[in-house]
């Protein structure tokens, strides 16, 4: 307790003396990187993840399903909300093939007994050779909205009508297993991690103050 009090006095003295940069370094050294707050904290009610891309539906349905499963896993692991199994989304789409494309976000949520829908619009998922043929590079971009099933209004984000943007860009050199499937999965894991972190507080692995770089 005495050591903490002495440290606090030292930090206060440094701050008053204009040593704010040094204070940030000392805080990082003693306490580690600060937690990043959630952008939005959902209610603990059943949530279904819905990933779609109607611009290129036939070519990216598999990608959308993989991303949906990854997002659900990340949300479930971090206890964001009770997550409806993504297999139920696929089953609903298969059993109501004729009507599914006409169903609204809220009607899909109702059919799956969810109270909120995390809607992810997959905008792009591309894998291309690196210049010189020395591996592969991939880019995935998406937009995210959390929708209330009861009345259809957007819970998050409240200032971006098209949704909150997330993206991942990944490379695999010739020394790595330059497999398009592996690269896509790596991108989807990255995007899923970013999506989930919108909804819970998390600690970065490394967030050094500029003074330490």
Image (spheres, rainbow, N blue to C red):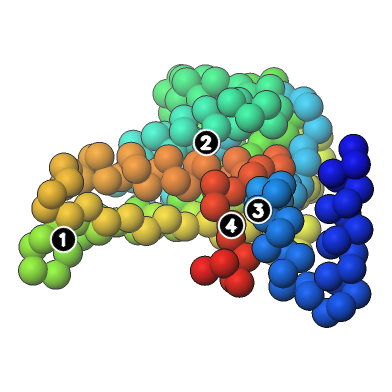
Describe residue 102's horizontal placement relative to residue 6 as left or right: left
Residue 120 drawn at (x, y percent): 55, 46
Please tell me whether mark 2 sits on a helix, a strand or a loop.
Answer: helix
Q: Sequence-wise, which precedes: disc 2 or disc 1?
A: 2
- In the rendered structure, which disc, 3 or 2, sits on the residue that comes first in sequence? 3
**Quarter-of-image position of residue 152:** top right
Labelled pair 3, 2 in contact (Cβ < 8 Å)? no
Judging by the rendered image, the residue that carries numbered circle 2 is 71
Compared to residue 122, the image places residue 109 above or below, namely: above
Which of marks 3 and 4 precedes in the sequence? Answer: 3
Q: Which mark is residue 198?
A: none
Q: Is residue 84 left or right of residue 66?
A: right
**Depth check: 106 or 156 in front?**
156
Quadrant of residue 112 within the rendered picture? top right
What residue lies at 15% left-to-right and 61% top-to-bottom?
Answer: 129
Instruction: Provide the secondary structure element on which disc 4 rests.
Output: loop
> Rounded to the nearest whole Å, what is the CA distance between mark 2 and mark 4?
24 Å
Q: Which residue is mark 3?
A: 29
Say which of 147 and 36 sits in front: 36
Q: Which mark is residue 129?
A: 1
């Amino acid at each position: 307790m005495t050591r903490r009090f002495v440290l606090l006095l030292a930090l206060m003295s440094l701050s008053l003396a204009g040593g704010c940069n040094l204070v940030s370094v000392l805080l990082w050294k003693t306490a580690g990187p600060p937690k990043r707050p959630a952008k939005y904290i959902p209610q603990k009610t059943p949530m279904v993840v819905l990933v779609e891309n109607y611009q290129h539906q036939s070519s990216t349905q598999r990608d959308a399903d993989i991303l949906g499963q990854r997002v659900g896993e990340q949300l479930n692991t971090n206890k964001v909300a009770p997550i409806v199994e993504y297999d139920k989304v696929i089953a609903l789409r298969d059993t109501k093939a004729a009507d599914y494309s006409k169903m609204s976000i809220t009607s899909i949520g109702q059919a799956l007994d969810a109270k909120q829908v995390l809607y992810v619009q997959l905008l792009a998922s591309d894998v291309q050779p690196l210049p010189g043929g020395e591996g592969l590079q991939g880019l995935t971009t998406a937009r995210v909205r959390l929708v209330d099933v009861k009345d259809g209004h957007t819970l998050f984000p409240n200032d971006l009508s098209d949704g909150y943007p997330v993206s991942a860009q990944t490379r695999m050199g010739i020394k790595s297993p330059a497999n398009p499937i592996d690269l896509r999965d790596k991108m989807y894991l990255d995007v899923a991690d970013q999506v989930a972190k919108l909804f819970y507080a998390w600690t970065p692995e490394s967030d050094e103050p500029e003074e330490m770089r």
